[in-house]
Image (cartoon, rainbow, N blue to C red):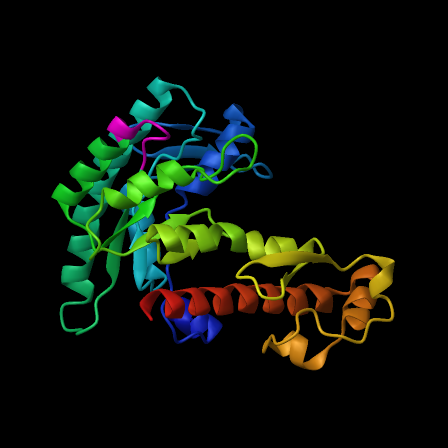
Amino acid sequence: FGGLHSFSRWQRPIITDSGGFQAYSLIRQDSNLGKITNKGILFRLRDSGRKILLTPEKSIQLQLKYGADVAICLDVCTHVEDPMDAQRFSVERTISWAERCRREFDRIVAHKYASEKRKPLLFAVIQGGGIYDLRRECAEALLEIGFDGFCYGGYPLDGEGNLLVDVLRYTRRLVPSEFPMIALGVGHPRNIIKCIELGYELFDSSLPTRDARQGRLYASKPGKETCKYIYIQDERHMRNKAPISQGCDCFTCQNYSLGYLHHLFKMKDPLYFRLASIHNLRFVIRLIEELKTNKDG
């Protein structure tokens, strides 16, 4: 198909993830499904039992093969409540793998993109959990290697689901402001608002579409830069002719009512998932646009 842009007919920038968080989630759920070695992440597929070794080099090869505009280095993700030895292990592997990713990225770009004016970018991930010394050590090493941008690494919420504001703020301050930063794992509108205040510009999360699929739709609170949930399964929406969110310009709000979406959800019609996802994604995009306009203005 010629890469993700051609495959999806999406002609705007595409950022691909390294696969590190997905492997982390798999292994965290069941340690028998994989392990992390110096070479990379070895994991086993649940269905077939087939083993796959995801190395830093392989991750970069795949991302560039897909035609990514921004590739992300393979890293070792942790939770903020993981012990010191796990955080130290994460930082050491993340730095080592970033060096390998940088070499492989440069090798491929020099060969494949030599004659092209627009070349892909490479971002690295700053790990360290909630231990500031490790965060600083990781950031300094990655800045020394040299990347086009950086990411907040590690699960961004504590055990109670609260955003790790202090850790996110500290990590952003470790990186010069001219470098863009992605807040990996941040997707709730409330948390996006806070992270933009802290200086993050990009976000990577499945939450808006997951919320949509599970019947949680985003709507504006009058006069406030935040949102409320509309639970579409509630019977009170059965005869509601209003859109999800007044003033929203998304395809769903311009064409369909809460009553119709309630009907689709109750019928488990696949069309609901598409319409709900379109709305939640557009809601988040509009929120970010408004916040950045207010910040710049």
> With 8 as the anchor, is 242 left or right in this view?
right
For the N terminus, give its image quadrant: bottom left
Using the image, determine if residue 132 lies above or below residue 186: above
Q: Residue at x 71, y 74 (%)?
A: 243
User: Which residue is at the far bottom?
Assistant: 255
Using the image, determine if residue 74 lies above or below residue 41: below
> With 214 as the anchor, is 85 left or right in this view?
left
Does the stretch in magenta take in 132?
A: yes
Does the stretch in magenta take in 266?
A: no
For residue 173, say whether it is visible. Answer: yes
Q: Is residue 166 or residue 46 the one in the foreground? A: 166
Using the image, determine if residue 23 lies above or below residue 121: above
Among the 4 quarters of the image, the one containing residue 135: top left
Using the image, determine if residue 80 lies above or below residue 174: above
Magenta span: predominant SS is loop
- Residue 46 locus on image (x, y percent): 58, 36
User: Which residue is at the far front?
Assistant: 223
> With 260 as the anchor, is 186 left or right in this view?
left
Q: Residue at x 66, y 74 (%)?
A: 246
Q: Is residue 157 or residue 295 the one in the foreground? A: 295
The magenta-colored residue range is: 127-134
For residue 188, say whether it is visible. Answer: no
- Residue 182 locus on image (x, y percent): 35, 52
Q: Number of numbered discs present?
A: 0
For the C terminus, give its image quadrant: bottom left
- Residue 253 locus on image (x, y percent): 66, 76
- Residue 247 locus on image (x, y percent): 61, 76
Q: Residue at x 47, y 42 (%)?
A: 22
Among the 4 quarters of the image, the one containing residue 295: bottom left
Q: Is residue 294 or residue 283 the one in the foreground? A: 294
